[in-house]
Image (cartoon, rainbow, N blue to C red):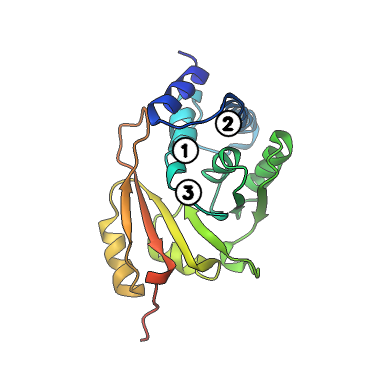
Amino acid sequence: MSYEDKFKAGVLVAGLNLSDAVQQKLLDYLALIQKWNKVHNLTAVRDPDEMVTLHLLDSLAVLPFIQAKTLLDVGSGAGLPGIPLAICLPELKVTVIDSSQKKASFMRQAKAELGIDNLEVLCGRVEDVRRDEKFDVVISRAFSDLCLFVNLTKHLCKSAGTWLAMKGVFPEAELKELAEKLHLTPSKTEVLKVPGLDAQRHLVFLPYENFKIKSD
């Protein structure tokens, strides 16, 4: 089975309602990652079959849970999950940020080459970003520490917004630390099913309204 067929089969298994045009654009995006990877080493995953599972299908697993007008993807790397979400949800304004100039350049190239008009690419450290408009959703699959994720981005999340943390195994220790240090508790945690992936995946919902910095 080609990696294209594997992707299309995965979309069906996941129950995602994506048009042929959207699926093709996602495959074009994957092909662009492969092309740049040969020279710039964007991601550690090199095999196209693994890219389908670990990049595309993993990113799309959160698609059913995105109900927002604006989204910030922090530490986006090659644009994951921000670019797949922007391709699938043209009404969603997606901002991706990474501190690597190389990765930001790739994301700008993907925006231009694939015509992703609802995508904004920033290069720099997220804690240095200053803007009046805050985001409905702040998402990341790059942070290993939930406290750090929240602390570095709390100035960018709307008071009615939500942090979404993409994790592997259920992050019990991180959530305990989050509750102790920031008095922030999740509203829920969803188990994500990624077709072809034999590993645990979770999506943690952290509403801003649950957030309170300890007074001491």
Report how far apart the C-alphas of labels 2 and 3 lie in the structure: 18 Å
For label 2, the SS is helix
Q: Name the residue at 27% across, 65% down.
A: 176
CB-based contact (under 8 Å), mark 1 and mark 2:
yes
- Which residue corresponds to mark 1? 60
| x, y percent for residue 34 | 59, 28
Query: Which disc, if any, is residue 66?
Result: 3
CB-based contact (under 8 Å), mark 2 and mark 3:
no
For label 1, the SS is helix
Nearest the eye: 149 or 160: 160
Does label 3 or label 1 sit earlier along the sequence? Answer: 1
Q: Name the residue at 60% across, 54% down.
A: 97
| x, y percent for residue 26 | 58, 31
Does label 2 or label 3 sit earlier along the sequence? Answer: 2
**Quadrant location, the N terminus:** top left
| 150 horizontally vs 33: left or right | left
Nearest the eye: 102 or 11: 11
Q: Pointer 1: residues within 10 angstroms few (<14), some, or many (20+)? A: many
| x, y percent for residue 63 | 47, 42
Where residue 41 sits, quadrant-wise, is top right
The type of residue carrying mark 2 is Leu
**Quadrant location, the C terminus:** bottom left
Q: Name the residue at 54% across, 42% down.
A: 85
The extreme top residue here reads 1
The type of residue carrying mark 1 is Leu
| 170 horizontally vs 99: left or right | left
- Which residue corresponds to mark 2? 26
Report how far apart the C-alphas of labels 3 and 1 lie in the structure: 10 Å
